[in-house]
Image (tube, rainbow, N blue to C red):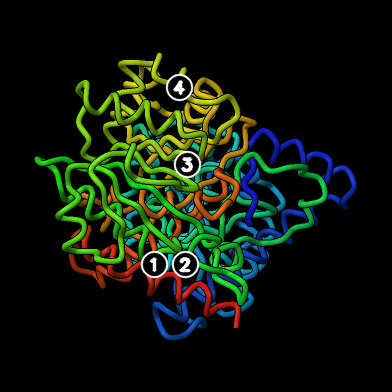
């Protein structure tokens, strides 16, 4: 599980590390990491390093200093390096001296367009962690002249480091080299960051507990429930699905199928789409109502049940069952409109809410806004529930403040029924007895991986995502062998 820290914590930790480190050593260590990755990018782009051309976009302060020192290291490998100084009077003195000593060129804004157009690689050292807001006009005017790949130092300039938001002109990086620890921007705006490379500069002991966490493939593979010699269909977890209607039978079929193919030893379906579910998934025990469904270890409720009196009754019955509940889609709308329904829930019984931005706005009275991490934490506290806020970066918050981030592999899951698949996955993990916060993060991870495997770079349906779930789990489990 990888940690992610806010810029406030990063800068505080850096100050403590700097106090115990010889002057300039930390910057040179970071810059060397930038230079090493820049050389790799040059080899990939041009097929060689010596004789290639790199343009440095250099702002004021330490971020620009990192770029200048990296340029000096690249010069020693035979790379032609030109630094464009956006604020010549504020350029990092030691970094600038090192570049000049190594034979690098220094130009102003008037020569910048040609240098950028000729460059095999552009290194973005304009704005560091301390800055906020879009690029200023002088820097923004250079963006159309960048034709090659871009390597960002710490983060793409113009992108907010803590929220990932962009409010005007900003760099879009092919790759980002960051130092010491991952920052929220790397998870919240991966499209701007590109591939993120973490360079160890000895910061970890100074950081403390992370503000945000991100699961990796091994985390999910290790924790994924698989049957052992003593297991049976009941010990694997029995998942109940209360979804669908005569109008929306597909929601029931998709959520149920995801649960069948993920991990459940048994799936019980309860609702008006029982015939459609039986036709597609004959292994499912399907009944017409929650009352007749029998005992389960967790319920999924909401996809396609409607927001009228009937749906409200179904939600109340599920909450009264005293088992973990994943409340999705129409269930979140019902909770927003009829909060008294939560009175049916026994205190302490796990509840997972899975809203998209619109459903979140109904639950909380406002959209998540720029601070999605703060917003999802507030929702988890308000409802005393795990809240999974869907998006290209899905955030999962627990009532105690823990937050997981899952970065999508693409946008293939932006298709009708995708959310129903996620809820079925999540329900099966809840039924297995996993911690609801971890279960939600794992479900989001496998959902994203299944979407990627199903798509193969072309649009895919939610049914295709369901079919790819076993392949996703097989891939993750295969990493452990």
Relative image position of residue 451 (x, y in whole percent): 31, 63
Query: Which badge, 1 or 2, comes first in the chain's sequence?
Result: 2
Identify the residue under disc 2.
54
Q: Comparing marks 3 and 4, which lies closer to the viewer?
A: 4
Relative image position of residue 161 (x, y in whole percent): 53, 39
How packed mark 4 is, by other alpha carbons closer than 10 Å (few <14, some 14-19, many 20 or more), is: some
Measure the C-alpha gap from mark 3 to mark 4.
27 Å
Callout count: 4
Identify the residue under disc 3.
395
Residue at the spot 33% in from the left edge and 57% down from the top edge:
146
308 with respect to 355 (left or right): left
Query: Which badge, 3 or 4, comes first in the chain's sequence?
Result: 4
Query: Which badge, 4 or 2, comes first in the chain's sequence?
Result: 2
Looking at the picture, tell me which residue is in the foreground, 134 or 376. 376
Relative image position of residue 456 (x, y in whole percent): 26, 73
Q: Are marks 4 and 2 in contact (CB under 8 Å)?
A: no
The dot on residue 344 is: 4
**What element does badge 3 sit on?**
strand
The dot on residue 119 is: 1
Q: In the rendered view, tell whether residue 45 sits above or below residue 375.
A: below
Measure the C-alpha gap from mark 1 to mark 2.
5 Å
Measure the C-alpha gap from mark 2 to mark 3.
37 Å
Q: Comparing marks 1 and 4, which lies closer to the viewer?
A: 4
């Amino acid at each position: 599980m990888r940690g992610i820290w806010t810029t406030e914590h990063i800068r505080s930790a850096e100050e403590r590390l700097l106090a115990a480190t010889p002057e300039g050593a930390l910057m040179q260590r970071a810059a060397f990491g930038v230079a090493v990755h820049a050389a790799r990018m040059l080899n990939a782009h041009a097929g060689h390093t010596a004789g290639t051309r790199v343009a440095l976009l250099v702002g004021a302060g330490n971020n620009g200093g990192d770029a200048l020192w990296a340029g000096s290291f690249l010069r020693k490998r035979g790379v032609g390096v030109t630094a464009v100084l956006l604020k010549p009077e504020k350029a990092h003195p030691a970094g600038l001296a090192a570049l000049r000593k190594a034979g690098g060129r220094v130009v102003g804004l008037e020569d910048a367009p040609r240098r950028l157009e000729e460059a095999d690689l552009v290194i973005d050292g304009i704005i560091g962690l301390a800055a906020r807001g879009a690029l200023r006009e002088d820097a923004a005017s250079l963006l159309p002249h960048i034709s090659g790949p871009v390597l960002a130092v710490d983060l793409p300039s113009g992108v907010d480091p803590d929220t990932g938001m962009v409010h005007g002109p900003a760099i879009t990086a092919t790759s980002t080299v960051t130092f010491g620890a991952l920052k929220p921007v790397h998870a919240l705006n991966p499209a701007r960051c590109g591939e993120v490379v973490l360079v160890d500069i000895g910061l970890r002991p100074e950081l403390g507990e992370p503000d945000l966490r991100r699961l990796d493939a091994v985390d999910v593979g290790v924790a994924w429930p698989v049957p052992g010699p003593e297991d049976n269909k009941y010990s694997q977890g029995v998942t109940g699905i209360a979804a669908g209607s005569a109008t929306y039978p597909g929601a029931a079929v998709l959520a149920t199928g995801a649960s069948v193919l993920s991990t459940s030893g048994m799936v019980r379906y309860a609702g008006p789409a029982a015939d459609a579910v039986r036709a597609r998934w004959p292994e499912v025990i399907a009944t017409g109502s929650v009352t007749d469904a029998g005992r389960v270890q967790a319920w999924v409720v909401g996809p396609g049940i409607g927001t009228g009196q009937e749906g409200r009754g179904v939600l109340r019955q599920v909450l009264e069952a005293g088992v973990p509940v994943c409340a999705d889609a129409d269930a979140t709308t019902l909770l927003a409109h009829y909060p008294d329904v939560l009175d049916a829930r026994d205190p302490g019984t796990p509840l997972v809410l899975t809203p998209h931005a619109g459903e979140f706005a109904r639950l909380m009275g406002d959209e998540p806004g720029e601070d999605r991490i703060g917003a999802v934490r507030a929702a988890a506290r308000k409802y005393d529930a795990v809240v999974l806020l869907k998006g290209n970066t899905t955030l999962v918050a627990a009532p105690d403040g823990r937050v997981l981030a899952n970065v999508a592999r693409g946008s293939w899951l932006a298709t009708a029924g995708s959310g129903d698949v996620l809820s079925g996955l999540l329900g099966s993990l809840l039924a297995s007895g996993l911690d609801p916060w971890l279960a939600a993060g794992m479900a989001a991870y496998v959902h994203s991986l299944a979407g990627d495997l199903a798509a193969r770079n072309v649009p895919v349906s939610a049914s295709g995502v369901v079919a790819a779930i076993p392949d996703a789990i097989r891939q993750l489990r295969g990493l452990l062998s």
